[in-house]
């Protein structure tokens, strides 16, 4: 896995020769640092400024793709002219039009039932946050004492199990988060591919940035179709490139802001090797 800035010249050539750029960005851990309470995550004004600029930039389309509920995500970002993708792809809003994955809303009663059970049973473990995402449910435990984490994970899995066995949910596991998701074969990767396919005529070059396990589906789905960037310490990710942290993501997005599409006509002598 190569660091984006170490191969920047090659990446830049590839961007110059693109017809357009479709930028897909995860939110938590990619655009904002991970915080203890998810509701405290906040986009810095600098990052917001860069995103606003990119959203208006000619040849660019920007999507934010997150595990958060769509309504939550829109509260956090508030930028016009971008595509919002919530609940790992189950909810999409594009140009004021909403898409909910057809089967997803069937899960709403199950999530309500699970929420009640979780709230009643997990009350004894301090620091647990149960988040209702309407078509999903998340148990956050970043604030739970390390020594309590194994017991918490065991309890949550035990509560989830009968629902999973009846195929009412599937279980997701991310950074200090266990989730009940609608039992649908749909993920960030499938949502990203659907969006990419929706561009008529000439396909843009996709760039996907993400930091967590759920982003791996997108790294696989977009492999060979664009530039995939893992945010964090390089490890087992399927992404081809990496950036170390949110601050480097900011620098990368600034470089994109300064980019002139079509620059290859004058600047590229050979085909880009990346
Ligand atoms: Mg993330």
Image (cartoon, grey):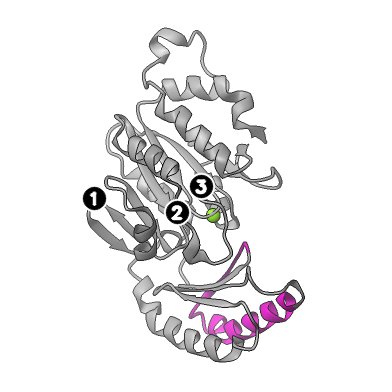
Ligand 1 within 8 Å of the CB at mark 3 = no
Asked if disc 2 and disc 1 are in contact, CB closer than 8 Å, the reply is no
Q: Is most of the magenta stretch helix, strand or loop?
A: helix
Q: Spatial distance from mark 3 to mark 1, Cα to Cα?
A: 24 Å
Query: In the rendering, at what x and y percent does residue 228 appear?
Result: 54, 39
Residue ID for mark 2: 190
Q: Spatial distance from mark 2 to mark 1, Cα to Cα?
A: 20 Å
Asked if disc 3 and disc 2 are in contact, CB closer than 8 Å, the reply is yes
Q: Which label was assigned to residue 95?
A: 1
Query: In the rendering, at what x and y percent does residue 124 appear?
Result: 64, 88
Disc 1: CA contacts within 10 A as few (<14), some (14-19) or many (>=20) = few
Disc 3: CA contacts within 10 A as few (<14), some (14-19) or many (>=20) = some
Q: Which label was assigned to residue 125?
A: none
Which quarter shows the N terminus?
top right
Residue 235, placed above or below residue 138: above
The magenta segment is 148-175
């Amino acid at each position: 896995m190569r660091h984006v800035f170490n191969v920047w010249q090659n990446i830049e050539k590839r961007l110059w020769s693109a017809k357009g750029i479709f930028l897909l960005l995860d939110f938590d851990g990619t655009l904002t640092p991970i915080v203890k309470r998810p509701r405290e995550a906040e986009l810095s004004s600098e990052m917001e400024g860069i995103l606003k600029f990119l959203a208006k930039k000619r040849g660019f389309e920007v999507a934010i793709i997150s595990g958060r509920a769509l309504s939550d995500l829109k509260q956090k970002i508030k930028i016009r002219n971008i595509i919002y993708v919530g609940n790992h792809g189950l909810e999409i809003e594009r140009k004021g039009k909403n898409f909910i994955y057809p089967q997803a809303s069937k899960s709403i009663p199950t999530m309500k039932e699970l929420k009640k059970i979780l709230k009643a049973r997990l009350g004894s473990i301090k620091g647990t946050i149960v988040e209702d995402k309407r078509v999903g449910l998340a148990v956050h435990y970043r604030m739970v004492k390390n020594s309590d984490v194994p017991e918490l994970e065991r309890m949550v899995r035990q509560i989830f199990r009968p629902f999973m066995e009846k195929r009412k949910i599937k279980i997701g596991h991310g950074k200090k988060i266990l989730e009940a998701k609608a039992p649908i074969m749909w993920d960030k990767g499938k949502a990203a591919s659907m969006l990419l396919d929706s561009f008529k005529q000439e396909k843009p070059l996709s760039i996907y940035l993400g930091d967590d396990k759920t982003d791996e589906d997108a790294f696989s789905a977009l492999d060979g179709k664009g530039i995939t960037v893992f945010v964090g310490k390089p490890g087992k990710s399927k992404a081809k490139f990496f950036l170390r942290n949110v601050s480097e993501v900011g620098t990368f997005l600034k470089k994109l802001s300064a980019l002139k599409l079509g620059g290859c006509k004058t600047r590229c002598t050979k085909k880009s090797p990346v």
